[in-house]
């Protein structure tokens, strides 16, 4: 089990096997934004935003952005994954709160997260 958010990031997002299976169109994505945050339930998290590059397949364009929340709580971890198909002018610069405001469903989904013990 990863012990820190950085360990979680290395194990999953920076791992090419994970990226090939989970990231949209990998390796046709670019990381736009990354920041640490704290969720409503007090869990530490790292938010990361990816965007498809021009080399993505036409069928993939309905999913322009993928937002990951890597969450570390006690001895466990979770990953929330959100696809966003609308324009996101703050996805490159943040802050994380502004990214949530792009679509109210993002905030609702992330705020609903609760770590079950």
Image (cartoon, helix red, strand yellow):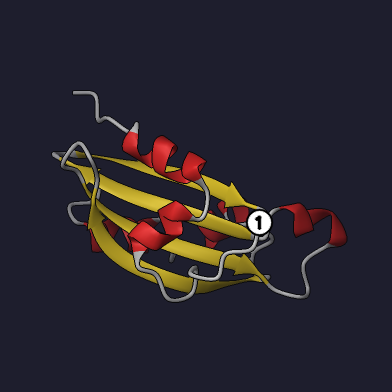
The correct choice, above or below, for 104 with respect to 115 in the image is below
Residue 81: % across, % down: 49, 46
Q: Residue at x 50, y 40 (%)?
A: 105
Q: Residue at x 43, y 76 (%)?
A: 93
For this orientation, the residue located farthest to the right is 58
Q: Residue at x 48, y 70 (%)?
A: 90
Check the picture and name the quadrant holding the C terminus. top left
Q: Residue at x 38, y 51 (%)?
A: 69
Residue nearest the viewer, comparing 73 with 90 = 90
Residue nearest the viewer, comparing 45 with 95 = 95
> How packed is label 1: few (under 14 Cα within 10 Å), some, or many (20 or more)?
few
Instruction: Examine the rendering and report whether any part of residue 16 can be seen.
Output: yes
Residue nearest the viewer, comparing 16 with 30 = 30
For this orientation, the residue located farthest to the top is 117
Residue 18: % across, % down: 51, 55
Residue 41: % across, % down: 19, 36
In-image side of 100 versus 52 (left or right)? left
Instruction: Examine the rendering and report whether any part of residue 15 can be seen.
Output: no
Q: Say which residue label 1 marks.
A: 86
In-image side of 26 versus 111 (left or right)? right
The correct choice, above or below, for 30 with respect to 68 in the image is below
Residue 101: % across, % down: 44, 53
The correct choice, above or below, for 103 with respect to 36 in the image is above
User: Could you say whether the residue bearing mark 1 is in a helix, strand or loop?
Assistant: loop
Instruction: Report the number of discs.
Output: 1
Check the picture and name the quadrant holding the N terminus. top left
């Amino acid at each position: 089990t990863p012990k820190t958010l950085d360990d979680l990031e290395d194990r999953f997002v920076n791992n090419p096997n994970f990226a090939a299976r989970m990231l949209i169109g990998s390796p046709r994505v670019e990381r736009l934004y990354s920041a640490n945050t704290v969720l409503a339930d007090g869990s530490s998290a790292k938010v990361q935003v990816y965007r498809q590059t021009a080399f993505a397949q036409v069928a993939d364009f309905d999913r322009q952005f993928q937002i990951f929340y890597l969450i570390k709580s006690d001895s466990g971890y979770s990953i929330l994954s959100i696809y966003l198909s609308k324009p996101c002018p703050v996805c490159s610069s943040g802050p994380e709160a502004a990214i949530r405001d792009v679509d109210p469903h993002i905030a609702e989904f992330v705020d609903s997260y609760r770590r079950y013990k």
